[in-house]
Structures are given as structure tokens and as C-alpha cells.
Image: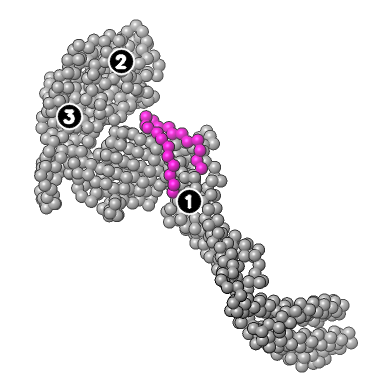
């Protein structure tokens, strides 16, 4: 045993002997059951206290005490009032607890005061359920072991319940991980049953009774401690909650003495290295997806995943087994569906997500939870079931302008009992969702605008060089050519109309409509030929278009010929109808014209194609 | 008032399909835009036509690339 703790205990006993504060004496604990579970790396204490008010005044406050060496390592404490017994037992309310500092308090005892839901009157009884978790109370002993040694730890406690109240009956049991017990303090009424040690029951204990015990036993639990854990929870309203966890893990058990032999570690049938741990198990929420496990080097492939409808289990194996004092660093990340964690209530939205690490039996010395909310979130508030340090930051991520608000929650000494849900409330309007696509859209639009400007810009240096002038002229020729083309196309379209009117005539026999169509096409074609004139004049005058002009001239001439033939055909047909000639007669008359029209049409189209290719 | 779960405006499973279709439409319109830029001569090019094509193309490309990001796991 360490010398300092022996001194501690002596001091404690001394102060207890001196102490006699009557302020707490109104209450009596009629029955106390204490169970301490040390199967993992931390000590979890559950107590059932039956409180009776034997005084004359009603009491509204209850005081819990722990020896100082335990109180200093207290990670988690919750007190609930319960009713009934056995299976019908119900937990009624979680009571508020705070560290107290009564007058004349001895240094060797930590005090916590519990506010009772209603004052306890004279003669009334009340049952309290206390859950407390202590870290660093399992001291490795010996402190340094070699690879082949087993891992032994030591626990100090008191067999009698340390309390400012008198205790009528008290029992105490210690649950150990294995039946291998090196030594334990043997008092009266001590029983060992398998891996459990029972002290008591002890009757009629005075206030502040204390009898130190020490248990020395083997522990196979993984003493995995996260020196620092940063959990980043990023909410995206596009349907995802992304969790990224950065772990700095250290084995806080007995330190490895001497060197590590991989050969001995993997030897069969007697592997040496029982004090090391190889795996860590993370229990992630159901429907977790896109899970990754990596470190600075890259992906770590030694992980396994199993999932069902209630949970997702991730078994990860670090790159090397961890012995006492060894450290490792890694990152795990996973995505969660938004609708499982984000809710709307009274005009606000809130994220309801677990605070602690999903790793089983992991103690975190410094936990930083960063909740990254979407850009544009306002009125942020956080509800936690226990006290944490809060602050706010801004984070810049994909497609951000103003940055995303980040709620930073910090807590030291976190045990799995802290894996309770926290709620982050904020206000967010769905309009803000559109800011990201709008940014992308404007980005693309700017690209297009740049292209438009580029094609319109004139980048030539010398504005008077012959090559530049020739290019300008050529551009103009091309533009004129396109105009000529479009006019000819229009002419061809009017020709089609004329033909259509002829077909209508043969169907309905209405000459008037056909004549009207003829009139309108006449005027249209006239207009078009008028438009064509200046263009042709320009092409003729332009020196660079001399070759092309010939073709264009030919095209225009052919088109005119086609036009004339069509008109002639039209006149013949209409006249035939007016004279009421037979259909066959008319057809005979226009047969030769029709032949010519078809060849001309073909020629015009060929010419157009030729010009199009320039 | 009871808390109501909030889901994404578009089901997450739709993102890959949506991204393929919007990007395809966007790229076709972009192609049309560049063909128009390259073939029409400087004189008779219509600014309105260019701007309308550019706007429609950028809307499709913008949403398409957003859905592509979301489908590939970059939740913006």
C-alpha cells in the first residue's frame, strides 16, 4: 500500500473522532445497502438508503459524504427517490445534488447536499437510490509489470458507511471481475462468494463510523482512458448528422516493465500479454452509415461492424496491442439519419444526441463536444443533464459565407454514465437551405457571363493592321451571308405555303382563299427581295467576297427562277379550276413545270448547303 | 406540443438519381450555349438568347452539382 494513502486514512480517522456536529443528527438511516462494482476500470457504486426522520422538525436537505480520496475522484453522482420494493420499485424523481461546504467540515470528507422533493416530516421515511462513479480509484499494484505478468489492482473503501447520520443496519458488497483475489481485509462478518466479497450486515453504527478495507485482485478489464476526445457533431438539414471523433487513448493500468516481445505475445498455446487490450467496442446508434476508422497514416483496416435495428456495433482494433502506459491516436466517423436526431418543437428545432463517447467502458479525461449547426441558426441554447462548460465558435466549411455557429461543450472526467442525451435548441428557417444551391448557380452563371464577354471582346493590339481589317471585313461578309441564307430560307418557306394553298384548292375547290394566299405570298416575296438587295450590293462591293458572291448570285438567280416557275404553276392551276377543267387535264398541263420546279429546288438546296459550309 | 422529427426537404435516397438527371440536362444546355457562341457570327448574335440559355444552364448545373455533393457524402 502507498504510504500517502495510509497517512490519509489515519488523518481521516482522527478527524472523524474529533468531529461531532449535531446539525445532521435529526435523520437516521434505518437501512443502507451498498454495492460497488469494479469489474471495469472504474468503480461504480450504487446505494439504497432508507431515511427516517427521528427528530421533531421537518428536514428538506440530505447530506451525502464520501471519504476525500474517493470524493476527489468522483466522476458521476445521481440521486433518485424511489418507491416500492423489488420488481415494483419505481424511480420517481432525480434529485438535484451539489457540492456542499458545511461549517467545521473536516478536510478528509467530501460533502454533497441533496435537496429533497418535499420536506420530510417527523417519523416519515424515504428511500434514496444513489449512483456514483469514481475514476482512478483502482490503483495498479505493483505499478510496473512485465509482459508475462497478470494485472493486479487495489481498491480502498470503508466497510462501514461513512455518514453524518446514525446507521441502524448496513451491508456492503464488492463485485470483482474474477475470483482471483490476492488479499482482502478480513473483518467480522466477511464472506467471499466467488468473485464477490460481502461485509456486514453491521448494526447500529454511530455517525461517521469508518473501517478501512483494502482489496487486492486481478483485473482483466481494459484500462482505456481517452486523455482527450473531441467529438464533432455536424448537422446538415439536407439529411445528415455527421459525427467525427478524435481519440487520444492511453492504457492507464500498470506500466509495462522491460521490453515487448511480439513473438511471446503471439505464442501459442501460452501467449504472454494478458494485461494488454487489443480491441475497443463502440456501440453506435442504429442506422449509422458511412463509418470510417483511420489515423494520420490512413485507413486502419482492422475493424468489424455488425448492425441490427437497435444498434450498430463497431469493433475496432488499434494498430498495436496497448500495454500499460502505451498510447494511440485514431479517428472514427459516421453519418446518422437526420430524422432520428433532429426535432421541431414550438417553433424551434432541437438536436437530441448522446453526449459521451460510444465506446464501452471508456473513461474520458477531457471531452470536448462541438455541435456544428447549419449556417443561419439563431437563438442557440443547450440543455444538459449535468454541468458542462459552454462556449461558442464559428466554423467555416463547404459553401459558407458567414460561417456556422458551433456550440462547444467541455467536461472533464467523463464516464459511461454520462452518456445521456443533450438537447441543442436553435432557430432555423428553411429559406437558408437555398443559399448553398444559389451560390453554386451564381458560380456557374459567372462562368457563362465570362464566356459571353470573351466572345464579344476584341483582343487585337493593332487596330490598323491589314490582317485585322481583313478579319473585320470577313466577319461582316460572314454576317451578311448568314442574313442572305435566312432570307432564302424564308423564301423557301413561303413557296411551301403556296404549294399548300394549291393542295387546299384541290381538296376544297375554294378559289378565293387560294387567290388570297397568292396575294400575300407575292407581297412577302417582294419584301424579301427588297431586303436582299442591299446585302447583295455589299457582297459585290466587298473584295474578300468576290468568290462567294458568284455563288450567292447563282443562288439568288435560281431562287428567282424557282419563284417564277411556281407562280406560273399556281396561275395555271387556278385558271384550270376557274375554267372547271378536269383534274387530269390540269395535271397534264403542269407536269413539265413540276419537273423543273423539283430540279430547281434541288439546286437551290445544294447551293445553300455550299454556302453554309463557308 | 410533442416533438416532431425533421427530415430533409428531398429524400436522401433520391439524390443520386436527381443529380444524374439535372446534370445531364444542364450539360446539354451548356453544350447548346457553346455551340451557339461558336457558330453564330459576332454581328447577329442575340444577347437575350445567350443570357437565357446561360441562366437555365446554370440553374440545372447548380442544383445538379449540389445533389452530386450530397449523394457523394459531402453534406453541405
Q: Specify the label residue A155 is tagged with.
A: 3
Distance between the alpha carbons at the discs numbered 3 and 1: 54 Å
Q: Is residue A213 left or right of residue A428?
A: left
Give the residue displayed 87% in from the left and 86% down from the top: A575
Q: Which residues are magenta?
A: A376-397
- Magenta-drawn stretch contains A110: no
Q: Specify the label residue A112 is tagged with.
A: none
| Residue nearer the viewer, A167 or A482 | A482
| Residue A204 place in picture, x, y as percent | 21, 13
Give the residue displayed 68% in from the left and 82% down from the top: A542
Q: Is residue A592 left or right of residue B39?
A: right
| Residue linked to disc 1 | A399
| Residue linked to disc 2 | A102
Q: Is residue A22 left or right of residue A243?
A: left
Kindly identify which chain the residue marked by label 1 belongs to. Answer: A
| Residue nearer the viewer, B69 or A204 | B69
| Residue A297 place in picture, x, y as percent | 28, 54
Amino acid at each position: 500500500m502507498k504510504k500517502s494513502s495510509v497517512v490519509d486514512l489515519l488523518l481521516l480517522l482522527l478527524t472523524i473522532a474529533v468531529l461531532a456536529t449535531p446539525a445532521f443528527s435529526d435523520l437516521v438511516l434505518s437501512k443502507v445497502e451498498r454495492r460497488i462494482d469494479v469489474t471495469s476500470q472504474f468503480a461504480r457504486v450504487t446505494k439504497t438508503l432508507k431515511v427516517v426522520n427521528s427528530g421533531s422538525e421537518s428536514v428538506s436537505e440530505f447530506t451525502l459524504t464520501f471519504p476525500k480520496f474517493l470524493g476527489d475522484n468522483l466522476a458521476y453522482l445521481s440521486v433518485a427517490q424511489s418507491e416500492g420494493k423489488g420488481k415494483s420499485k419505481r424511480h420517481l424523481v432525480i434529485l438535484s445534488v451539489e457540492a456542499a461546504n458545511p461549517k467545521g467540515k473536516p478536510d478528509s470528507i467530501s460533502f454533497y447536499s441533496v435537496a429533497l422533493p418535499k420536506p420530510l416530516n417527523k417519523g416519515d421515511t424515504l428511500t434514496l437510490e444513489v449512483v456514483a462513479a469514481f475514476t482512478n480509484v483502482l490503483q495498479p499494484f505493483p505499478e510496473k509489470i512485465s509482459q508475462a505478468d497478470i494485472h493486479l489492482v487495489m481498491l480502498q473503501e470503508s466497510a462501514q458507511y461513512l455518514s453524518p447520520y446514525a446507521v441502524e443496519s448496513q451491508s456492503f458488497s464488492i463485485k470483482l471481475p474474477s475470483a482471483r483475489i490476492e488479499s482482502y481485509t478480513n473483518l467480522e462478518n466477511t464472506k467471499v462468494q466467488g468473485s464477490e466479497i460481502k461485509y456486514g450486515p453491521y448494526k447500529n453504527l454511530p455517525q461517521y463510523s469508518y473501517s478501512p478495507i483494502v482489496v487486492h485482485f486481478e483485473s482483466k478489464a481494459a484500462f482505456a482512458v481517452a486523455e482527450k476526445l473531441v467529438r464533432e457533431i455536424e448537422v446538415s438539414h439536407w439529411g445528415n448528422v455527421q459525427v467525427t471523433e478524435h481519440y487520444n487513448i492511453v492504457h492507464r493500468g500498470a506500466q509495462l516493465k522491460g521490453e515487448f516481445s511480439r513473438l511471446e505475445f503471439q505464442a501459442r498455446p501460452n501467449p504472454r500479454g494478458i494485461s494488454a487490450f487489443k480491441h475497443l467496442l463502440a456501440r453506435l446508434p442504429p442506422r449509422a452509415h458511412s463509418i470510417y476508422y483511420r489515423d494520420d497514416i490512413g485507413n486502419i483496416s482492422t475493424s468489424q461492424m455488425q448492425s441490427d435495428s437497435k444498434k450498430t456495433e463497431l469493433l475496432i482494433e488499434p494498430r498495436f496491442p496497448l500495454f500499460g502506459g502505451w498510447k494511440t491516436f485514431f479517428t472514427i466517423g459516421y453519418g446518422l439519419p437526420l430524422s432520428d436526431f433532429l426535432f421541431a418543437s414550438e417553433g424551434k428545432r432541437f438536436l437530441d444526441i448522446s453526449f459521451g463517447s460510444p465506446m464501452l467502458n471508456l473513461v474520458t479525461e477531457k471531452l470536448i463536444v462541438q455541435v456544428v449547426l447549419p449556417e443561419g441558426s439563431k437563438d442557440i441554447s443547450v440543455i444538459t443533464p449535468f454541468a458542462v462548460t459552454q462556449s461558442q465558435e464559428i466554423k467555416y466549411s463547404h459553401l459558407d459565407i458567414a460561417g456556422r455557429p458551433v456550440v462547444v461543450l467541455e467536461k472533464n472526467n467523463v464516464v459511461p454514465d454520462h452518456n445521456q442525451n443533450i438537447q441543442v435548441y436553435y432557430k432555423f428557417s428553411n429559406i437558408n437551405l437555398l443559399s448553398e444551391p444559389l451560390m453554386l448557380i451564381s458560380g456557374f452563371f459567372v462562368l457563362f457571363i465570362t464566356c459571353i464577354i470573351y466572345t464579344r471582346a476584341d483582343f487585337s493590339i493593332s487596330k490598323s493592321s491589314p490582317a485585322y481589317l481583313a478579319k473585320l471585313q470577313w466577319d461582316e461578309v460572314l454576317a451578311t451571308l448568314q442574313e442572305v441564307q435566312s432570307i432564302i430560307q424564308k423564301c423557301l418557306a413561303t413557296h411551301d405555303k403556296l404549294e399548300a394553298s394549291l393542295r387546299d384548292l384541290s381538296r376544297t375547290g375554294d378559289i378565293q382563299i387560294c387567290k388570297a394566299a397568292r396575294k400575300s405570298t407575292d407581297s412577302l416575296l417582294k419584301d424579301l427581295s427588297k431586303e436582299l438587295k442591299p446585302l447583295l450590293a455589299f457582297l459585290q462591293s466587298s473584295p474578300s467576297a468576290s468568290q462567294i458572291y458568284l455563288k450567292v448570285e447563282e443562288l439568288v438567280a435560281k431562287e428567282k427562277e424557282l419563284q417564277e416557275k411556281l407562280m406560273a404553276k399556281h396561275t395555271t392551276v387556278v385558271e384550270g379550276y376557274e375554267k372547271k377543267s378536269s383534274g387530269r387535264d390540269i395535271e397534264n398541263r403542269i407536269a413539265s413545270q413540276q419537273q423543273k420546279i423539283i430540279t430547281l429546288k434541288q439546286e437551290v438546296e445544294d447551293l445553300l448547303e455550299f454556302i453554309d459550309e463557308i | 406540443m410533442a416533438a416532431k422529427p425533421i427530415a430533409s426537404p428531398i429524400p436522401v435516397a433520391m439524390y443520386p438519381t436527381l443529380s444524374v438527371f439535372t446534370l445531364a440536362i444542364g450539360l446539354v444546355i451548356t453544350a447548346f450555349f457553346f455551340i451557339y457562341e461558336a457558330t453564330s457570327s459576332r454581328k447577329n448574335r442575340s444577347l437575350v438568347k445567350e443570357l437565357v440559355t446561360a441562366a437555365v444552364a446554370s440553374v440545372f448545373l447548380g442544383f445538379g452539382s449540389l445533389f452530386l455533393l450530397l449523394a457523394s457524402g459531402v453534406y453541405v
